Amino acid sequence: MIKNVWRNPFFLAGFLFVFALISSSFYHHFVMNNEIYENQIIYDGITPVEKAPFEPSIEYWFGSDRMGADLFYQIISGAKYTLGIAFVASLLRIVLSFLGGILLLSAGRALSLIKGLSQSFYYIPSALLIFFIVGPVISVEQISFWEKAIFQVLLIVLIAVPNTAILMKEEISLIQQNEFITSAKLMGGNKFHILFKHIMPHLWPKLVLMYVQQVIAVLLLLAHLGILGVFFGGTIYREYGPEFEIPVSVSNEWSGLLGGYYYQLRLAPWLVFFPVLSFAAVIMAFNFMAEGIKRTGDQLPGRKKMKKIEEDSEGAVPVESFVFLSERKIG
């Protein structure tokens, strides 16, 4: 499947967009020294003609904020943090959920209780839960940037593990219903042999798809947290006029840009529009990748054969229904 997925145009389009964005972010960090161009006044010779914030133009592609900072470079700079959080958090979600799913296979009667408890997360918005837990922590100046970042990432990971672990357990249980699993058990295969030799080859496509879906979920969660003023690595407050402060991210991570500039929506609507557009574009790219993975999985020989068998079994009429036509009543 890994080789075939690169031939899918949907997956390739999404992957190239994300790869180009990450490459640009690292180029800006290492080659351009992560410099953000700032200019509060534009001069025509010696005469000032315009004052920040500047609207989108040839010079400022995405416009600038009130301090004259170029929004385009801020988005490019923050891309590595936003996508990095999504990649790491999603990977940890899948790994912990996989281990949890294996443990749930032997949960027995306790499984129904665990399912009942995990369903409560469906009714509690994740963004609000993280906001009430992380909010007081990230505003403490004595805690370092990385301590806040690690704490926030761990909370983003753990909040999704219960439901994802149950989903993982159901996927493994579905694979275990196949005849080749029963044959492996009859031949004396132990649990680890069956897991890694028989279950994992069929589970890998699902894991890859679930990983991409988790990346999308984390990006949406970061956008919601940004609106609530919870930024990656902590939040600082900057004076914005007399007796008024606005939350500002200590990095250029996209949720920080979205939440910080949300208060300037009426003054400069482009400051909110382009971070939202960036989130939407990346989420669409990952949706393209997920669609490519699904289509590649449906085109696998084993999947095609299974679908054909299911279609034939649905369309065919049982032979037993016509047995009575060939039988004769005797006596």
Image (cartoon, rainbow, N blue to C red):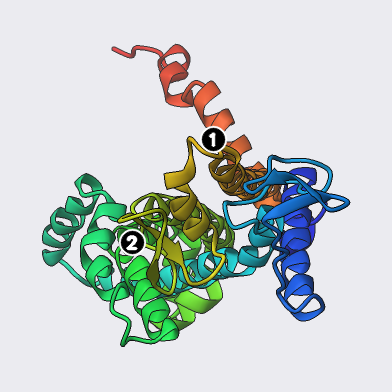
Q: Secondary structure at mark 2?
A: loop
> Measured along the vertical axis of the image, is residue 196 above or below residue 216?
below
Residue 270 picture quarter? top right
Q: Is residue 78 left or right of residue 319?
A: right
Whole-percent x and y of residue 296? Answer: 70, 48
Residue at image coords 39%, 49% = 227
Identified by mark 2, the residue type is Ala
Identified by mark 1, the residue type is Glu
Q: Residue furthest front?
A: 46
Label 1: few (<14), some (14–19) or many (≥20) C-alpha neighbours in 10 Å: few
> Measured along the vertical axis of the image, is residue 295 above or below residue 175?
above
Dot placed on the residue nearer the N-terminal end, 1 or 2? 2
Q: Is residue 46 left or right of residue 10?
A: right
**Residue topped by disc 1:** 310
Q: Secondary structure at mark 1?
A: helix
The residue nearer to you, when weighing 236 against 160, is 236
Q: Is residue 268 left or right of residue 281?
A: left
Exactly how many numbered labels are in the figure? 2
**Residue topped by disc 2:** 160
| Location of the N terminus (image quadrant) | bottom right
The residue nearer to you, when weighing 127 against 291, is 127
The residue nearer to you, when weighing 18 against 64, is 64
Residue 309 picture quarter? top right
Q: Residue furthest right?
A: 45
Label 2: few (<14), some (14–19) or many (≥20) C-alpha neighbours in 10 Å: many
Residue 310 picture quarter? top right
The residue nearer to you, when weighing 142 against 212, is 142
Residue at image coords 69%, 62% = 38
Whole-percent x and y of residue 75? Answer: 64, 58
